[in-house]
Image (cartoon, helix red, strand yellow):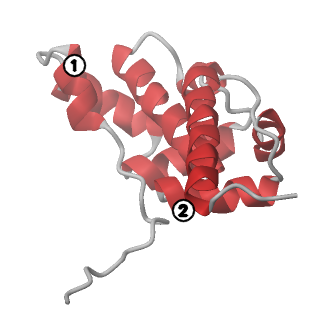
Amino acid sequence: MTSRPAAAQHLHDLARLRRVRDRIDREYAQPLDVEALARGVHMSAGHLSREFRRAYGESPYSYLMTRRIERAMALLRRGDLSVTEVCFAVGCSSLGTFSTRFTELVGMPPSTYRRRAAQATAEMPPCITKQVTRPVRNREARVTEPHLA
């Protein structure tokens, strides 16, 4: 039995990781866990987590939570849903976990964000609002120093 050349295997793995990322982007409000995501691309959960982190700078779970928080931010800016309703609408099952992660990523609790964002973005077009309010989530990404020859 011969194995694929390393470059071809790497491209195959990247395609599977993109499928996982695309699934998270599409199904963020559904109950997703790393094991289910890994089964969908025929990888072990550990291998998926390692390779996803290597490719995208954060774990699949962190990426999922970032997508959920981004969507929650948009729903909170709209202002017609309570924080609890937003929590469940984006796929979180625990208000405590949602609030903690929201505060960690955005820098303020969801209720405070809702009050401030409604005022601050009232006159902005939605495409600009999305761009300027996107949370930054790469604390887990490896920082690599440039290689100087």
Q: Height in image: 97 above or below 92?
A: below
Determine contact: label 1, label 2, CB under 8 Å.
no
85 displayed left or right of 146: right
Residue that appears at 21% across and 36% down: 132
Instruction: Label 1: state its secondary structure.
Output: helix
Q: Residue at x 59, y 51 (%)?
A: 8
- Residue found 15% across the figure and 14% down from its top: 125
Q: Amino acid at mark 1?
A: Cys
**Quarter holding residue 119:** top left
Can the viewer see residue 102?
yes
Residue 29 to residue 34: above or below:
above
User: Toward which corner of the image does residue 34 lie, by quadrant?
Assistant: top right
Q: Residue at x 46, y 37 (%)?
A: 110
Give the residue at mark 2: 54
Residue type at numbered disc 2: Arg
- Indicate the position of residue 27 as horizontal and vertical percent values: 64, 22
SS class, disc 2:
helix
Pointer 1 residue: 127
Residue 18's spot in the image, x, y percent? 55, 37
Q: Is residue 99 visible?
A: no
The furthest residue to the left: 123
Residue found at the far front of this picture = 1
